[in-house]
Structure formats: C-alpha cells, structure tokens
C-alpha cells in the first residue's frame, strides 16, 4: 500500500471516529474537541504504538504544551477514540493506538 493509500485510510478512520463521537454524544466542550485532538487522532492512527513523548517531539505539535497534549489524549481516551496500554518493558510508558471504526 503506498503512502497516499495509507494517508487516505487513516483520514477516513479519523472522520468516521469524529462522526461516531458526534452521534454518540461523547464529545466534550459542547460538541467541540479540544484544539489539536483530531490532529493527534490522525497522528496516532498513522503511527501505531506511539507515545506522548513521540507526539511532543513531532514538529507539527510544537505549538502545543505537554499539558495540552495530555488533555487531548485524555479526551480521546474518554471518547473511546484511542486505547492506551502499558509498555511491557517500562511501566511508565503508555502506547497509544486508534480504535478502528466500522
């Protein structure tokens, strides 16, 4: 699968997840996600098993503070858009993955 196909697949998954959150009423802030949440959702989908550290080191997210990144991750977790699992090697590391939507 070429890069464009992968990009398109992740974009469709992010859009489906956004629609699911709207339909199920799981969105916070009166129906609006925090700034950067959809971007992080797409990043996590494109980079399986990513971590918060990886997100903060990504140049695209340079304008977001660590606390904002954590709030966005918490919001996406509460919306059941992503899963977080503890690393087997280091209990302090949490791997983030997008939940696939049908």
Image (cartoon, rainbow, N blue to C red):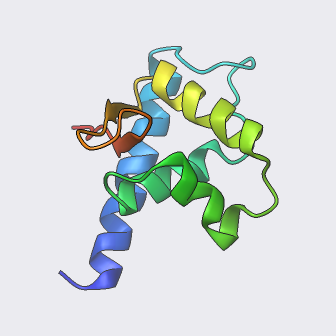
Left or right of residue 78, residue 8 in this image: left
Where is residue 54? Give x, y as percent.
52, 59
Residue at the farthest left position: 1
Q: Quadrant of residue 58?
A: bottom right
Q: Residue at x 52, y 16 (%)?
A: 26
Looking at the picture, tell me which residue is in the foreground, 91 or 96: 91
Left or right of residue 53, residue 2 in this image: left
Q: Is residue 27 above or below residue 38?
A: above
Where is residue 87? Give x, y as percent.
30, 39
Where is residue 97? Give x, y as percent.
34, 44
Query: Exactly how many numbered labels are in the figure?
Result: 0
Q: Residue at x 66, y 18 (%)?
A: 28
Q: Residue at x 49, y 37 (%)?
A: 18
Q: Quadrant of the C terminus?
A: top left
Q: Quadrant of the N terminus?
A: bottom left
Q: Residue at x 53, y 25 (%)?
A: 22
Looking at the picture, tell me which residue is in the foreground, 9 or 76: 76
Q: Is residue 54 above or below residue 37?
A: below
Residue at the farthest front position: 90
Left or right of residue 44, residue 2 in this image: left
Looking at the picture, tell me which residue is in the foreground, 96 or 12: 96
Where is residue 55? Give x, y as percent.
57, 56
Q: Is residue 25 above or below residue 16?
A: above
């Amino acid at each position: 699968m070429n890069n464009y196909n992968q990009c398109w697949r992740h974009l469709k998954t992010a859009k489906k997840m956004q629609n699911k959150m709207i339909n199920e009423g799981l969105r916070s802030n009166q129906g609006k996600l925090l700034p950067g949440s959809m971007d992080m959702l797409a990043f996590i989908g494109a980079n399986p098993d990513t971590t918060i550290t990886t997100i903060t080191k990504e140049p695209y997210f340079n304008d977001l503070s660590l606390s904002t990144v954590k709030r966005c991750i918490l919001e996406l977790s509460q919306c059941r858009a992503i899963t977080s699992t503890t690393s087997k090697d280091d209990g302090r590391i949490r791997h983030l993955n997008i939940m696939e939507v049908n």
